[in-house]
Image: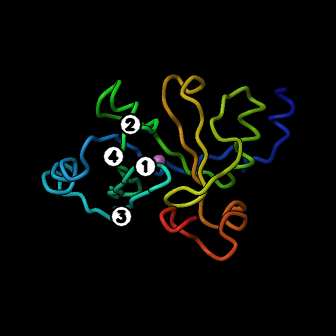
């Protein structure tokens, strides 16, 4: 097992940076009153994602973004999270060069994944790892622009999720 992991290319083991930190909020406008108005962060994106029944906002801070996630109905995992645990930290997202390769390595390593393949996220191909394998933290991976999943998922160029399907 160790030999298998060590035998993979070094790039496969590379975490680029923290891409964003996501916070679940009950009411996006109320949360923007804090993050945008009181703390003075810029809002780069407000994006409804109908298929996930959430609205998100991205607020860049240096090289990282804060992602605010507000459920738009009561049926989603995010809504259930909000109902049971209240507002607060939801997930951390790491940028990697190749989400598929990273998932393969992590599964070999015994990490439980939620997504077995990259899927379209708000800003590119993403996959989630299960909190059970991550010391209670929901971990998202996003592929750096130009990675192999970009070509597969967006053969005609990037499409934001609200424009998909
Ligand atoms: Co995220």
State the SS at label 4: strand
The number of numbered badges drawn on the structure is 4
Residue 44 picture location, percent across and down = 33, 65
Cβ–Cβ under 8 Å for marks 2 and 4: no
State the SS at label 1: loop
Residue at 33% from the left image edge and 55% from the top image edge: 61
Residue occupied by mark 3 = 45
Q: Looking at the image, is mark 3 or mark 1 earlier in the sequence?
A: 3
Q: Looking at the image, is mark 4 or mark 1 earlier in the sequence?
A: 1
Residue occupied by mark 2 = 79
Cβ–Cβ under 8 Å for marks 4 and 1: no
How many other residues sit within 10 Å of disc 3, few (<14), some (14-19) or many (≥20)? few
Front residue of 80/21: it is: 80
Is the residue indicated by label 4 positioned so its CB lies within 8 Å of ligand 1? no
State the SS at label 3: strand
Residue at 26% from the left image edge and 62% from the top image edge: 42
Report the Cα–Cα distance between label 4 and label 3.
14 Å
Mark 4 vs mark 1: give the one in front: 1
State the SS at label 2: helix
Report the Cα–Cα distance between label 4 and label 1.
9 Å
Is the residue indicated by label 1 positioned so its CB lies within 8 Å of ligand 1? no
Q: Vertically, is 137 above or below 98?
A: above
Cβ–Cβ under 8 Å for marks 3 and 2: no
């Amino acid at each position: 097992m160790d030999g298998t992991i060590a035998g993979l290319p070094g790039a496969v083991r590379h975490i680029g940076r923290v891409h964003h930190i996501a916070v679940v909020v009950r009411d996006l406008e109320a949360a923007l009153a804090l993050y945008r108005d009181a703390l003075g962060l810029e809002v780069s994106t407000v994006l409804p994602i109908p298929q996930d029944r959430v609205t998100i906002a991205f607020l860049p801070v240096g090289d990282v973004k804060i992602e605010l996630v507000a459920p738009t109905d009561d049926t989603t995992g995010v809504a259930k999270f909000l109902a049971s645990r209240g507002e607060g930290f939801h997930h951390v997202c790491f940028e990697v060069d190749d989400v598929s390769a990273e998932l393969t390595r992590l599964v070999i390593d015994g990490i439980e994944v939620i997504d077995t393949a990259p899927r379209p996220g708000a800003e590119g191909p993403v996959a989630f790892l299960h909190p059970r394998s991550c010391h209670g933290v929901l971990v998202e991976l996003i592929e750096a622009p130009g990675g192999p999943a970009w070509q597969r998922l967006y053969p005609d160029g990037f499409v934001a999720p609200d424009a998909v399907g």
